[in-house]
Amino acid sequence: MKGKCLCGLIEFDLKEDIPNLYQCHCSLCRKVTGSSANAAFRISADQLLWKNGVEQIREFITETGFKSHFCNNCGSPLPNLTANDSAYWVPVGLLEDSEELTLVAHLFIDSRAKWDVVADTGEHFAEMPDAETLDRLLRPTKTVI
């Protein structure tokens, strides 16, 4: 599966199984996306291969450690490594073909924007579920060919 930023300068490939999706409705994810929620998934670090444009990637880190990577040219949010560098968070909107992916969880719905209407699909969590629950839900169900 292929992904790229809005301007196309940064491209990446994903290999192996693609996990299910979550939407995070917290205030940080709203600010990073400029939308009601951040639709994303996590994959192990070895599943993402940067193809072009790595030199265009910029990083912003808040005082609390929340980080955002983005394209220096177009501003698109980009995959970034988790705190322990073992996995990437991947914004699903960057993917060229995401029709086969499934939304399974809504996170931090208690802190969603008042105007945000959360879809009925997937499990709803007031905050972040425990790691075991989230990992079970996000477990890959589709295989990339």
Image (cartoon, rainbow, N blue to C red):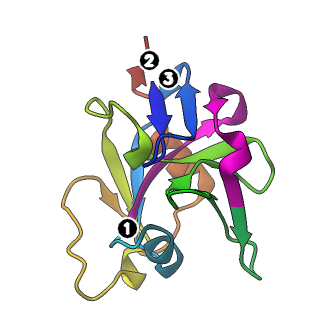
Quick one: label 1, few (<14), some, or many (20+) residues within 10 Å?
many
Tag 3 residue: 17
Tag 1 residue: 37
Disc 3 element: strand
Q: Are marks 2 and 1 in contact (CB under 8 Å)?
A: no
Give the extent of the magenta segment.
37-58
| Magenta region includes residue 139 | no
Question: Would you identify the image quadrant in which residue 102 lies?
Answer: top left
Quick one: label 2, few (<14), some, or many (20+) residues within 10 Å?
few
Q: Is 120 on the left or on the right of 54, as rendered?
A: left
Q: Which mark is residue 15?
A: none
The picture places residue 145, in percent across and down from the top left corner, at 43, 10
Question: Would you identify the image quadrant in which residue 46 lies?
Answer: top right
Q: Earlier in the sequence, mark 2 or mark 1?
A: 1
In the depicted view, which residue is nearer to us: 135 or 75? 75
Amino acid carrying label 3: it is Asp
Q: Earlier in the sequence, mark 2 or mark 3?
A: 3
Tag 2 residue: 144
Amino acid carrying label 2: it is Val
Image quarter where the N terminus lies is: top left
The picture places residue 36, in percent across and down from the top left corner, at 33, 73
In the depicted view, which residue is nearer to us: 120 or 90? 90
Disc 2 element: loop
Amino acid carrying label 1: it is Ala
In the depicted view, which residue is nearer to us: 73 or 59? 73
Q: In this picture, is 23 found above or below 16?
A: below
Q: Main secondary structure of the magenta part?
A: strand
